[in-house]
Image (cartoon, coloured by chain):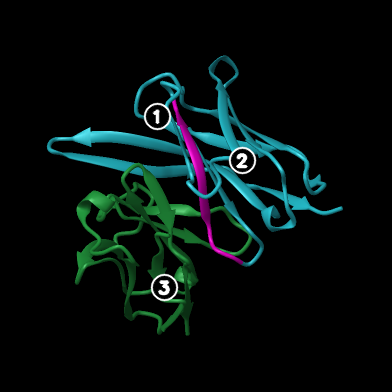
Amino acid sequence: QITLKESGPTLVKPTQTLTLTCTFSGFSLSPTGVGVGWIRQPPGKALEWLGLIYGNDDKRYSPSLKTRLSITKDTSKNQVFLTMTNLDTVDTATYFCAHNRLFCRGDYCHVDYDYWGQGTLVTVSS
Amino acid sequence: QTLVTQESSLTVSPGGTVTLTCASTTGAVTYASYPNWFQQKPGQAPRSLIYSTSNRNPWTPARFSGSLFGGKAALTLSGVQPEDEADYYCLLYFGAIPVFGGGTKLTVL
C-alpha cells in the first residue's frame, strides 16, 4: 500500500526559505520510472505543479519557479524534500507530494500521479 | 506562457451525462500530451481518475471515461451520481513539464 505524508512548518515569514519533507512508504525511489512530485494549491485556487524527482535523481521544475526550487531525496529514509527560497505571501498554499509512475506498455508510454499525500498548509505571513 | 483551459463550472442532473474538456493554448491536445484527470472534493487531496488520455486507475468507477475530441482532452461522466459533485482538474504534458488546468466545478443538481 502506497502512502505519502507531507511535513514541515505551517508558518513562514516573507523572504525566508521553506523546506518540506515528503515521507513515503509502499514503494522505493530506486527504480527508474518512479518519482515523487510536488504540487501546491493556494486557498480556493487551482492546482499548480512545482517539480519532480525520479529515482535516478533526474529532476524537473516548473519553469516559472525553477530559480527558487530545489528537490532532493534521501532514498535510505524514503524521503523527498522540497526547498523553496525567498517566500512571498502568494506562496501561501497547501503543498502536496504525490507518487509518479512512468511506464511503457507495448508501443505506448504512460505517466500518472496515482497516490497523493494529504497535503500541508503553509502560510507565508509576517 | 502555456495555459490549460477548462470550463469553470458545469451543472448536471443525477443520472445524466456530462463532458468536461481540457484545451491547450498552444494547439491541439494529443496522446503525447498524456492527459490526466483528477477529482478533488472539499478538504481532500486530489484523486487520480484517468491517466494517459483514457486509462482508468483501479479505483476509478466505470462511469468515468477519458478521450480526445475536437483537439481537446475530454472526461465524460455517464450516469452521474450525487457523490460526483467535486472539482475536476486536467493535467497536460508539454514535453517533460506538466501543467494543470484551472479546474471545473461540477455541480450535481
Residue A14, position as x, y percentages in the image: 79, 49
Structural distance between the alpha carbons of marks 2 and 3? 42 Å
- Identified by mark 2, the residue type is Arg
Q: Which residue is mark 1?
A: A34
- Identified by mark 1, the residue type is Val
Q: Which chain is green?
A: B
Residue A111, position as x, y percentages in the image: 32, 42
Majority SS type along the magenta span: strand
Density class for disc 2 (Cα within 10 Å; few <14, some 14-19, many ≥20) is some
First in residue order: circle 1 vs circle 2: 1
Q: Taking A10 as reference, is B6 above or below it?
A: below
Please give left or right for residue B95 compared with residue A117 in the image: left
Give the position of the N terminus of chain B as an image quadrant: bottom left
Q: In this view of the protein, which residue sits in the foreground, A118 or B29?
A: B29
Please give left or right for residue A70 compared with residue B47 in the image: right
- For residue A46: magenta? yes
Kindly identify which chain the residue marked by label 1 belongs to. A
Kindly identify which chain the residue marked by label 2 belongs to. A
Q: Which residue is mark 2?
A: A68
Q: Quadrant of residue B14?
A: bottom left
Q: Which residue is mark 3?
A: B81
Structural distance between the alpha carbons of marks 1 and 2? 24 Å
